[in-house]
Structures are given as structure tokens and as C-alpha cells.
Amino acid sequence: MTNQKVTTIKQIVQGMPASDGAGVKLKRVIGQPMLERLDPFLMLDELGSEDAQDYIAGFPKHPHRGFQTVTYMLNGKMRHKDSMGNEDVIEDVGLQWMNAGKGIIHEEMPMQVEGKMRGFQLWFNLPSTEKMSTPGYQDIATADIPELSTEKGSLIRVLAGDYKGQKGAVTTQSVKPQFFDVHLVANESLNIATEPTHNGFVYVYHGDLEAAGEVLSKVHLALLSLASDLVLDGKDGARAIFVSGEPINEPVVQYGPFVMNSQEEINQALVDYQQGVLTQ
């Protein structure tokens, strides 16, 4: 008789207070001392405040090279503007995907002066063969994000990847990401098919949730060892994101908004930015 492998939790990490941009207050979940990186993920931030002073300064114009970002807004309005000529407003439960590739300069600024602003930004790495790829941008309205409901009333929003045959809204295949926003009703179990070759995590942003047999509270991330379906049990209407991706297994050298494979490539990115040719 063989032992069946099961998905387990390797580590639990609590989001830490931090600030970014021009002083936006947020919680840094990946990219902090307890979890510096999770290949292919470089950073996960949660922004959440009803005090405009915590977010009003926004994220003024800044460069990126060598990775991709996904911004998922739960509440509020944020304007995106970039060096490719794209300009959009991402609104409640909308999604934005951006491939920085060889270089992009963009800004993300609040389009409100009061009320709740809440959302996530996830950075995921690119393999060396795609780090100098052509930049790209995809704005996805909430109506274009597939949703599936269970008979008991739980909801799964499929941002990227495949959930029970439903393809997600984000089309990138660089690290074959899965990204689901899960809203669980109390006392319902949900099985999520996982990719055993991926690195993955669950992050709880509302209520309490039982994942792989352990109870997680708000602002906690569970780093998973994926081997089978992930079982989630709702506690008082919990909400969480489940994310996984194929590890790249390459050297990572990061200097702020530039993520490459060597110091020489970082130095070149700095020179290109200083000389105004980063996006050319």
C-alpha cells in the first residue's frame, strides 16, 4: 500500500507594515525578512485603508524591467498610465496585468480622495529568455473575470490559470500562474486542484480560514507544499487568494524596480534608465 501525498503547509507568515511609492501605507507579505521570495514570486503587497492619507500620494512615475505585475483592486479606483501610451482606471474588483519586459515607465495614482482603497499587487519573475521581451499591458474589467459559484454560495473568481475547466482572465503563460480569489461561506469545504510542480500560497484577507488542516487568520500567508488538491474550509465567510506558479530556478539579482539574472544586467538597466533608453 502506497502513501498518498497530500498538500501541506510549510510555513505561515504574517504581513508586515511597510510603505512604498510616495508613502503609501501597505502590508508587505512576500518581499519581507520572513519570506524574501517564493520563486517565481518576488513580492506581494496588500493595500487597505479607509484613510485617504494612507494612499493619496500614490505611486508616481517609476521604471521596471525584467518581471511582470498583477494589480487586483478589491475597492477603490487607481489610474494606470505608462510609457507605451496606455491609460486606464482600474476599479472595484478589476484586474491589471503588465509585462515590464525590457522596460516600462508607469505610474499608479488614486482617483479618489476619500473612501476605502484596497487591493493587491503581485510581482512575478520572468525567465532569462523573456526578461528583454516587448512590454505589454492588459486591463481587465470585473465583468470579464470569470466567476464560479457553489450550490452553498461560495464564490471563486478565476483571475489566472484554470479552475474546473474555466480559464482565467490573465493570459500570460510565462510561469503558468494560478490566481484565484475565493469567497467561502461558513462550513463549506472547497477543493482546489493544484500543480505539484508549482510553488504556491494562500493569503487570508478576511475572516478565518482552514487550509490543509490548519486555521489561518486575516493577514496571514500559508506557504504550501503542493502535492494534491488544496482543501479550504470556510470560517465565518472567509476570503482569501490562492496563487501558484512554476518556479524558474534561475539566479535573481534585484535592485529596486529592476530584476535580472546578474549584476551586469542590473548595471545596464540603470545606465539605460539614466540615459533615457530603458523603454527603447
Image (tube, rainbow, N blue to C red):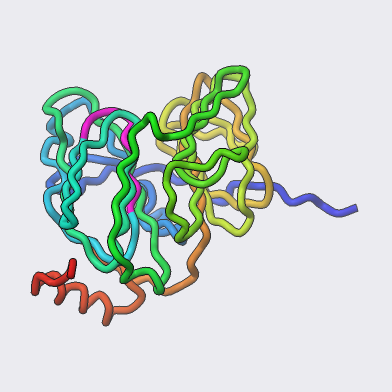
Range covered by the magenta-colored residues? 69-77
User: In this rendering, is residue 133 above or below 217?
Assistant: below
Q: Is residue 70 magenta?
A: yes
Q: Position of residue 144 (x, y in %)?
A: 40, 34
Residue at the spot x=27%, y=78% of the render? 265
For the question of whether residue 256 can be seen, the reply is no
Q: Residue at x 49, y 52 (%)?
A: 177
Magenta stretch encompasses residue 131: no
Q: Residue at x 37, y 58 (%)?
A: 42
Question: What quarter of the picture does the C terminus occupy?
Answer: bottom left
The answer, for residue 13, to whether it is visible in the render is: yes
Q: Is residue 1 left or right of residue 98?
A: right
Task: Say if 257 sits above or below 162 in the image.
Answer: below
Is residue 82 or residue 197 the one in the foreground? 82
- Give the quarter of the image for residue 130: bottom left
Q: Is residue 90 left or right of residue 142?
A: left
**Residue 162 % position (x, y):** 56, 44
- The residue positioned 52% from the left and 50% from the top of the image is 200
Residue 205 in the image: x percent, y percent? 41, 32
Query: In front: 174, or 33?
Result: 174
Magenta: main secondary structure equals: strand
Q: Is residue 94 above or below residue 176?
A: above
The percent position of residue 1, horizontal first and vertical second, equals 91, 52
